[in-house]
Image: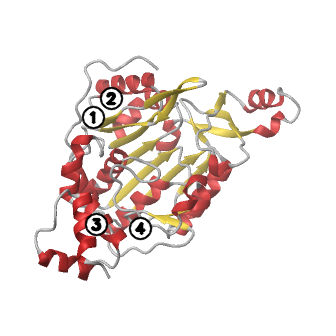
Amino acid sequence: MLLDNDIIAAYETMLGRCPENQEVIAGWKRSVSNLSDLYRALRSSDEYFNANSHYGLFHSVSPPDVAFLRSFRKPGLQGTPDSVTDFLGSRTNIKFIGPIKELAGTVEDIPVPCNFHSKSYEWVGSLRAVDEAEHFFTMIELGAGWGPWLIACAIAARDKGIGRIDLIGIEGDRTHCEFLHEHFVNNGFDPAEHRLVHAVIGAKSGVALFPIVENPADVWGSEPQFFADVTEAQRVAASGDEGETSRFEVVPALSLADVIAEHPVIDLLHIDIQGGEADVLEAGAELLDERVSRVVIGTHRRRIEERLHKLFHRLNWQLEADDPCRFGTNDQGLVLTMDGTQVWKNRRFAKAAPSAEEPEHPSQSE
């Protein structure tokens, strides 16, 4: 059982003050059973957020966005020994991602400033698409990995009572694609009822070579090489040193039109393909503008971010979030240390969120 001094110390540490009165202390004793839960509750409070946001702790995520994420938080979630459970109830098996083994059995709070795989901006942008959907929800995840965004949004849509949910996932790594199918099953979705494709996304249809890595759970940044036909792809794969052919697999390359064609409206397009985002979206701009309501993009270079700004300004879309990628240095020189995020809303579709402040002159540096 918590002691009065425990609660007082927690308040002083987290909020910089003492509890208001003895009644508040008694209330905490009734509602939480251990110190960890108390600290977690205080960290989730509006007071803690408002006290710390100006230090950059939450990367300028607004109080309304925090409240929006909390509106999706599912109470009473229980962890499972082999998984990390997020605030929606989506369970990610720890075998999918090497570095999260220590999180097995945990239940995450709202992702402010982030959770184990993404930042708040990406969560807010993705869940706004669910919030705006009514009777149907259609989503595409390009570079799907194990499908975290497909399942998180599908759970949110299911909990909202949306009757028809159509999910499309495109993933180039064969083992990651197996993870994708398993993630669906683990969370109560039948992969056969959705479109999960072992392929890559490119500016145009064709084929590609995709790296085969030794430990797929530890490698999530592979990039494809594109070719016009299978013969050329096989020739290049076979032209390396002895044993080189085992390092690549020939996979289909799909264009954005190939993926979108049969869907009149896409509520959310989530794309994170390790550097090809601008190529794909520029090539499919006309269909993108006609059918997609919102796009959440993982960015990896300044030049890509600039091209995306130019594209969506030309299309007259609204910028909802813009968190640029970050760089550092090591023995190899300048390296990407954190992916960026852009969220764009198509003005052809209603209910746009408040727009983000846009830079007057996007950087052209890499």
Q: Which residue is mark 3?
A: 41
Helix, strand or loop at disc 2?
Answer: helix
Helix, strand or loop at disc 1?
Answer: strand
- Judged by depth in the image, the label closer to the viewer, 2 or 1, is 1
- Judged by depth in the image, the label closer to the viewer, 4 or 2, is 4
Q: Nearer the viewer, residue 266 or 41?
A: 41
* Gap between marks 2 and 1 measured at Cα: 8 Å
User: Badge 2, how many Cα within 10 Å: few under 14, some, many 20+?
Assistant: some
- Judged by depth in the image, the label closer to the viewer, 1 or 3, is 3
Q: Are marks 2 and 1 in contact (CB under 8 Å)?
A: yes
Is residue 328 something one can see in this rendering? Answer: yes
Residue at image point 40% right, 27% down = 305
Picture quadrant where residue 39 is located: bottom left
Q: Nearer the viewer, residue 150 or 12?
A: 12
Q: Are marks 3 and 2 in contact (CB under 8 Å)?
A: no
In the rendered image, residue 94, in percent from the top left (x then y), is placed at 57, 61
Total labels: the figure holds: 4
Residue at image point 55% right, 46% down = 170
Q: Looking at the picture, does residue 337 appear above or below residue 294?
A: above
The amino acid marked with disc number 3 is: Ala
Residue at image point 34% right, 22% down = 310
Q: Name the outermost residue toward the right.
A: 242
User: Going from the N terminus, do you reach mark 1 or mark 4 first?
Assistant: 4
In the rendered image, residue 356, in percent from the top left (x then y), is placed at 24, 35
In the rendered image, residue 261, in percent from the top left (x then y), is placed at 47, 42
Q: Quadrant location of the N terminus?
A: bottom left
Q: Which residue is mark 2?
A: 312
User: Badge 4, how many Cα within 10 Å: few under 14, some, many 20+?
Assistant: many
Q: Which residue is mark 1?
A: 319
* Gap between marks 1 and 4 measured at Cα: 29 Å
Labelled disc at residue 85: none
